[in-house]
Amino acid sequence: MFSQSNERLYDSIKKLTELSENELLDTAERLNYSKIASSMADETKNDTLILNTNRGLSYIHLINGDYEIFKDISLDNLKLSKKLNDSSAIAYINKNLGWYYYQIDDDNATSYRYLIEAFDFFNRNGILNEKAEVLYSIAVIQDNEKDYLGSEQNAIEALRLLNVLKVDDKSNDKYLLLNLLGSVSYKLDNYDKSIEYHNRALELTKRINYGNDLYLETLNNLSLPYRAKGDYEKALNIYNELINDPTLKKTDIVFYALILNNYAFTKFLKGKYNYESLEKDFLSALKIADSIDDPYTKLASSIDLAKFYKANNKSESSLFYAKESYRISSEIPINELYLESMMLLSSLTEGEESNSYLREHIILNDSLLKVERANRNKYARIKYDTDQIEAENEQISKENFYLILISLGLLLTAVLTYIVISQRAKNRKLKLVQVQQKANEDIYNLMLSQQDKVDEARTQEKKRISEELHDGVLGRLFGTRLSLDSINFKDGKDAMMTRANYIGQLKTIEEDIRKISHELNMDFVSGSGFMDIVSELIETQTQAYGLESDFDYTDDINWDTVNNKTKINIYRVIQESMQNIYKHANAKTIKISIFLEKNVICLDIIDDGEGFDTSKSKKGIGLKNMTSRVEDIKGKIDFNSQQGEGTQINVSIPYNSPS
């Protein structure tokens, strides 16, 4: 029975939950009420009540900015909702986790996986508003990963859904979608469509909060497709309106500097400009960006100045700003401008230096293309896997439904049979036994039939997988082996080339098998081991700097388990230290070693240069950069040096060995 104490407990939880949802109270009070409600719900052992109170608790932590606690509670809630088979709760929790991993953890792949699962539920149940929101989030991730066609498709579908809903308070959501579509269309070189979307977004800024700020931002976005299609007059008219806005310079000096630079560069593209006036605008934008230490605007101004000076035959100034843009873009994630800086430097330099920049451009461009392809495949695979799981779940649900139906039918038959048999006279006992025997045989046959269906389905699935492996991978292996046998005893260049071709085919087949067995993981640089990358860096730098080097490392570190952030910072510390040795130490030899000691990755860099006074030189930008990078990955760095006795750098970084 439901006791009075239980009733009071449930009433208390209900009242506390209502207080936690009262937006008139401050967040601290709401959080306290929610924690008490959640704790009391645990006492009831009622999973549904525990889930509901914990979902409320996770939301209060979210609005309070406790993002890690929000994530942990949400993950627990997801497990509980799956245990309860609460598909609605599963969908909304997946949506929230998708938001967290995109906005807070910067993990696009994990965010995409959660969002896809949420989308499937909203799509199946016709919850259009939530479906549109999730589609927008997916489209943003696809835009970030350069899947522009996929992003455009999902954004258009989300916009269509919002138009179907015809809800007045969706202007902000429509603005975000139109702005995204304008940006994606621009990246797809569809400038007229980009202009159309941005103009529609511009109209919506009149109906939403903070509309003036969005109006100015959208104007800048609108100027880009006009400039790209060569309509410089319209682009300049837009920049004139932005620069003359009375609030812009006071409220957003970073945006003002960017607009000033874009304005100057558009004048430069148009031609027939006043050199001194245009140079002044470029330098003013750069000065503002430099004064507020905004690397993105500094990068844009530097590369545009380099182009401006190059066009005006100011080679020395052009080279200076090209190198500056190259330096900045190597430190922030704008790969397009990094590539552009390399090409600019290649055209401004000569001989081996020019070739070096060109080679670097080719290597990075190829690497980025591989990463983009891998990302597109990864997201397609996530979508495919989610669809497969969904299809399997539907099939299991159908099978369970049929089993329950059969069981109920059998149970009903047994009950009816029992009633009929129990009412028969004793003189029909023999017939009663026969009826019972027949009923038992029917039950047995139905069970056998159901088991046969299950076994047949399993056999068919095994056969399908076997045929795919046999006819696909093994067929290609057999064909390649026969082809190699046919030229096994042939000599000559043609035979060598043919064998090389077949070996290449074997490598492709090997890669196909690896893709079936393991999830593709683009780690640091596609196709290379980390120690190979470090070795290449050391070899390239020592040749360029005229140094003798000794690089020693052990094989007891599994670099595949070390996260990319740690590897990137180790790479940059080695690169920065070699640059410092070249610039300041006048060393002849450098010794670098990487080894594992007591579950700590140890990096030692020793040179025989002039050394320096560590008490006076730690403020240098190079040493600061190295210290900052090591501290960012929870490591330690020590500089040991004296004048005339060389320098030793010791770095220690925690290593979590694979279990």
Image: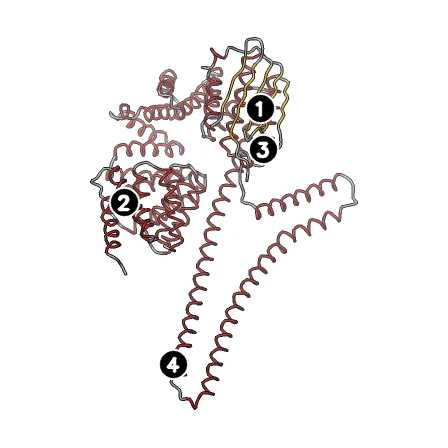
Q: How many angstroms separate mark 1 from mark 4 (CA)? A: 93 Å
Q: Which residue is mark 3?
A: 557
Counting the numbered discs, the total is 4
Q: Which residue is mark 1?
A: 356
Q: How is the image coloured?
A: secondary structure
Relative vertical location of residue 216 with respect to residue 108 in this rendering, above or below: above
Q: Earlier in the sequence, mark 3 or mark 1?
A: 1
Crowding near pointer 1: few (<14 within 10 Å), some, many (20+)? some
Q: How many angstroms separate mark 2 from mark 1 (CA)? A: 52 Å
Mark 3: amino acid: Ile
Q: Residue at x 25, y 35 (%)?
A: 211
User: Does the residue at mark 2 contact the one at mark 4 (Cβ under 8 Å)?
Assistant: no
Q: Residue at x 48, y 77 (%)?
A: 440
Q: Earlier in the sequence, mark 4 or mark 3?
A: 4
The dot on residue 419 is: 4
Q: Earlier in the sequence, mark 2 or mark 1?
A: 2
The dot on residue 170 is: 2
Q: Earlier in the sequence, mark 2 or mark 4?
A: 2
Relative vertical location of residue 256 with respect to residue 546 in this rendering, above or below: below
Q: Closer to us: mark 3 or mark 2?
A: 3
Q: Closer to us: mark 1 or mark 4?
A: 4
Q: Element type at marker 4?
A: helix
